[in-house]
Image: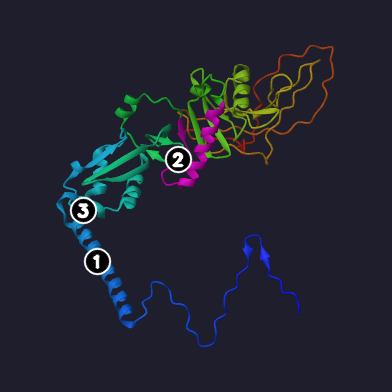
């Protein structure tokens, strides 16, 4: 006879379930009655339990809906916190439909969106306070600049949202911001936000060293997001400086270091283009025929195109801006009017030869010709 061996594991001998024979009934769950009467009784009990829950829920809902204790009686039941620029009278019309309504049927999400459509409100939270109170928490916008649109002056925040405030209220808050132009209410919010980002970076760079250099700025024209045109007050007049879209602090320091020299050499200086790495384009005002001069920062002062270099000194190259360089347009932001200037021709690089004769002082004025001067494409007219 063969030796039979039992398979064992670590927990002891393995037990095998006895196979069910053909015709045997399966094992019934413990909760299922064996008889038909028991199954009918179980079904009836389940239906009764669900019916009790449904009736209770309906009764509770009906109680909460019609009970006067949960009804918003008037505007005194609406509380608001965080208000400074926005008055309570501006908030209450949003909840006008909810007066006399049950507090559980006030659409809080919809009311929050309506509150955030008020220009001064950046974010709002609306909550229910049982039994009959609505609480509103408001976060208001912070203005960062004055905005001038024609003769109207308002405020604007960092996202380009226009904020209206009476002049008396502005004086009460003692705002100290530069004036921003070039943003209109009809512009898309994305366009306004992009232009205000340029403004934010400019002010942030100028104030990064703690000297508050932005206080020396009178006005910023953001008509072109790629060129921040800054109006700089200087000795009773305003000079338009083109700062571009980056390196604001470096260009500001370059302007402050040379502006006295430029004004002494060019009394009719109107615009300074600082967007070039090693050169600065100077634009004159008035009806003179002086062409825009290019200043080489590696050398001495710039000279107009009609001047001759002094003997024994290296020549400074003075040219008109190239046609593919950015042009200066739409600077109509000044109180005085600048006239157009005629472009000058490009000079060639030559070396100054020494001369034994003493040359007279070069004249500033350009010899007038019969030909009618043509406007330079980079010349601008300011109002």
Query: Are the residues flagged by discs 1 and 2 in contact, CB closer than 8 Å?
Result: no
**Of the two numbered discs 3 and 1 in the rendering, the one whose residue sits closer to the viewer:** 1
Q: At which x and y percent is residue 338?
A: 52, 30
Name the residue nearer the viewer: 85 or 360: 85
- Figure check: 313 above or below 64: above
Q: Which of marks 3 and 2 is nearer the N terminus?
A: 3
**Numbered range of the magenta stretch:** 179-205
| Mark-to-mark CA distance, 3 and 2 | 39 Å
Q: Which mark is residue 102?
A: 3
The residue where tag 2 is placed is 160
Q: Is mark 3 on a helix, strand or loop?
A: loop
Name the residue nearer the viewer: 206 or 6: 6
Name the residue nearer the viewer: 249 or 232: 249
Q: At which x and y percent is residue 53?
A: 26, 64
Residue 351 colored in magenta in the image: no
Q: Which mark is residue 52?
A: 1
């Amino acid at each position: 006879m063969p030796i039979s061996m039992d398979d064992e594991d670590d927990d002891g001998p393995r037990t095998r379930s006895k196979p069910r024979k053909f015709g045997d009934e399966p094992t019934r769950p413990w909760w299922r009655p064996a008889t038909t009467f028991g199954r009918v009784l179980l079904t009836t009990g389940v239906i009764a339990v669900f019916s009790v829950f449904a009736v209770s829920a309906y009764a509770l809902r009906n109680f909460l809906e019609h009970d006067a204790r949960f009804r918003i009686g008037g505007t005194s039941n609406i509380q608001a916190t965080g208000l400074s620029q926005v008055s309570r009278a501006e908030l209450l019309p949003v909840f006008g439909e909810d007066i006399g309504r049950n507090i559980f049927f006030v659409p809080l999400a919809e009311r929050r969106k309506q509150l955030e459509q008020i220009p001064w409100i950046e974010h709002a939270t609306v909550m229910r306070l049982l039994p009959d109170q609505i609480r509103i928490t408001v976060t208001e916008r912070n203005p960062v600049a004055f905005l001038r649109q024609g003769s109207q002056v308002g405020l604007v925040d960092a996202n380009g949202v226009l904020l209206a405030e009476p002049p008396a209220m502005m004086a009460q808050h003692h705002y100290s911001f530069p004036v921003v132009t070039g943003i209109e209410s009809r512009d898309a919010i994305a366009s306004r936000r992009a232009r205000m980002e340029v403004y934010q970076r400019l002010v942030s760079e100028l104030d990064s060293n703690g000297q508050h250099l932005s206080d020396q700025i009178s006005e910023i024209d953001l008509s072109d997001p790629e060129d921040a045109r800054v109006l700089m007050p200087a000795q009773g007049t305003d000079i338009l400086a083109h700062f571009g879209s980056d390196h604001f602090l470096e260009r500001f320091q370059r302007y402050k270091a040379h502006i006295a020299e430029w004004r002494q050499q060019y009394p009719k200086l109107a615009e300074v283009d600082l967007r070039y790495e090693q050169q600065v384009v100077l634009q004159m005002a008035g009806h003179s025929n002086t062409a825009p001069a290019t200043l080489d920062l590696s050398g001495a002062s710039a000279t107009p195109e009609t001047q001759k270099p002094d003997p024994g000194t290296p020549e400074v190259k003075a040219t008109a801006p190239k046609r593919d360089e950015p042009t200066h347009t739409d600077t109509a932001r000044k109180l005085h009017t600048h006239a157009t200037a005629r472009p000058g021709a490009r000079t060639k690089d030559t070396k100054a030869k020494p001369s034994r004769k003493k040359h007279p002082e070069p004249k500033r004025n350009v010899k007038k010709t019969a030909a009618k001067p043509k406007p330079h494409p980079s010349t601008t007219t300011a109002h």
